[in-house]
Image (cartoon, rainbow, N blue to C red):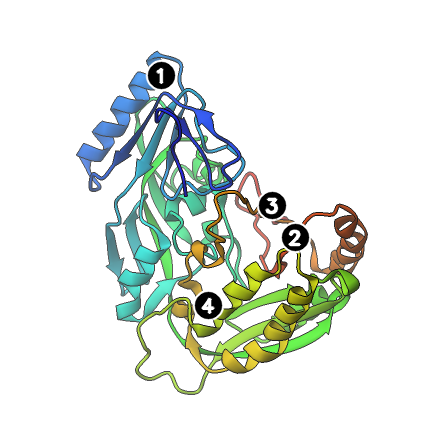
């Protein structure tokens, strides 16, 4: 990802479509404690005195430009300190820790993140600030797994927030895009790592929302996701539902891995779809048939979520992929698919992928996107 250009006074996001002038960009590697707080207070005071914005990030991947402080102070956290409380299945971590750091720390003791984004290189606190979701089921967005955090308010006051302490600030910050203050540390739930076996089910696309909910009535389902085909001649006509349940053998779990053989093959096929309808058909055959055999064996929960975003990177500086997310009630999914069949092919965009995930109702965040 290219963050700088020109004389180093601009910042861009992962799309490379939002190059924005900034006043400065600093990286803080301080451990949790007064030194980190003092450095942040100094930046806040300088920015306030000069009427400049402040933004803090970790991976700085968010597309749209909203995380770049125009003419302001961009601060990147680069510290992965994590403390585990295995008895209570919780981790205390620096706001700059990435999900891969959390997996690496928790996996050896049989634990892993309860809910995280679908890529492991994003920052944990950043995930909370957008209240992102993952694909563990049946779960609410990631904010539901945060027990407490410490945060610097714009005036420099350090406060602790939880569901019982400064609860309004807790719920405003969850999904608040960093507008309330700067998080320095968090206490986040962990879940037991288990060996899982996948089940693959091909269904008509219109039925996928309803079928997804039906499958989740089985409390043994631990992870689940869906796919839709993207070839133009039968666009979004077919769906694939993949659900994971614990296997009978839970002994001697292997260390968390990422990007297995099937994932690497899928990445190459994914990129070959560009302008190639035959390859889109081949990809669907690979996912709905071949991959069910290659990836049909058991894996661990931590390995499934331990995937970097660059797996799907085309490494082409002249191209940009844009991700759209839509939140649709399951009972209206068939209606949504029918509209997509009309709108998307008529736009003549190069359409590569659909991934479906389940997000349970969020009644905590003030900016909830999952109200049903």
| Tag 2 residue | 372
Nearer to me, 312 or 122: 312
Question: 10 Å neighbourhood of mark 2: few (<14), some, or many (≥20)?
Answer: few
Position of 37 compared to 233: left or right?
A: left
Nearer to me, 334 or 346: 346
First along the sequence among labels 4 and 1 = 1
Position of 320 compared to 261: left or right?
A: right
**Residue that lies at the very extreme toward the bottom in this rendered image:** 248
Asked if labels 2 and 1 touch by Cβ distance under 8 angstroms, the answer is: no
The residue under the point 31% across, 48% down is 97
First along the sequence among labels 1 and 2 = 1
Labelled disc at residue 369: 3
Residue 31: give x, y in percent of width and height. 20, 42
Asked if labels 1 and 3 touch by Cβ distance under 8 angstroms, the answer is: no
Front tag of 1 and 2: 1
The residue under the point 52% across, 68% down is 266
Asked which secondary structure carries label 3, the reply is: loop
Question: 10 Å neighbourhood of mark 4: few (<14), some, or many (≥20)?
Answer: some
Position of 258 compared to 230: left or right?
A: left
Depicted 73 relative to depicted 80: above or below: above
| Tag 1 residue | 48
Front tag of 4 and 3: 4
Labelled disc at residue 264: 4
Q: Quadrant of the N terminus?
A: top left
| Residue 43 in sight | yes
């Amino acid at each position: 990802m290219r963050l700088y250009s020109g004389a180093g006074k601009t910042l861009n996001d992962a799309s490379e479509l939002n190059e924005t002038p900034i006043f400065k960009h600093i990286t803080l590697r301080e451990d949790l404690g007064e030194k980190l707080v003092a450095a942040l207070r100094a930046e806040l005071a300088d920015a306030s005195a000069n009427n400049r914005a402040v933004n803090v990030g970790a991976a700085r991947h968010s597309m749209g430009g909203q995380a770049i402080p125009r003419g302001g102070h961009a601060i990147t956290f680069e510290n992965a300190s994590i403390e585990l409380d295995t008895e209570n299945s919780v981790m205390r971590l620096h706001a700059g820790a990435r999900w891969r750091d959390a997996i690496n720390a928790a996996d050896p003791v049989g634990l892993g993140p309860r809910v995280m984004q679908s890529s492991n290189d994003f920052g944990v606190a950043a995930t909370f600030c957008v209240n992102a979701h993952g694909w563990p089921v049946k779960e609410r967005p990631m904010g539901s797994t945060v027990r407490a955090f410490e945060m610097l308010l714009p005036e420099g006051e350090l406060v602790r927030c939880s569901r019982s302490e400064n609860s309004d600030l807790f719920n405003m910050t969850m999904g608040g895009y960093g507008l309330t203050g700067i998080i320095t540390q968090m206490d986040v739930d962990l879940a037991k790592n288990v060996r899982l076996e996948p089940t693959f089910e091909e269904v008509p696309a219109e039925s996928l929302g309803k079928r997804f909910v039906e499958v989740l009535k089985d409390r043994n389902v631990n992870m689940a996701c869906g796919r839709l085909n993207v070839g133009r001649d039968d666009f979004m006509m077919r769906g694939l539902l993949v659900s994971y349940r614990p296997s009978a053998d839970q002994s001697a779990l292997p260390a968390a891995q990422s990007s297995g053989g099937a994932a690497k093959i899928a990445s190459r096929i994914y990129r070959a779809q560009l302008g190639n309808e035959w390859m889109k058909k081949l990809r669907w055959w690979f996912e709905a048939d071949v991959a069910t055999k290659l990836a049909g064996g058991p894996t661990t929960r931590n390995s499934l979520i331990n995937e970097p975003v660059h797996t799907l990177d085309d490494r082409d500086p002249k191209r940009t992929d844009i991700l759209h997310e839509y939140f649709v009630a399951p009972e209206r999914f068939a209606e949504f698919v029918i509209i997509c069949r009309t709108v998307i092919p008529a736009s003549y965009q190069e359409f590569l992928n659909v991934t479906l995930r389940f997000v349970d109702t969020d009644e905590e965040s003030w900016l909830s996107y999952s109200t049903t």
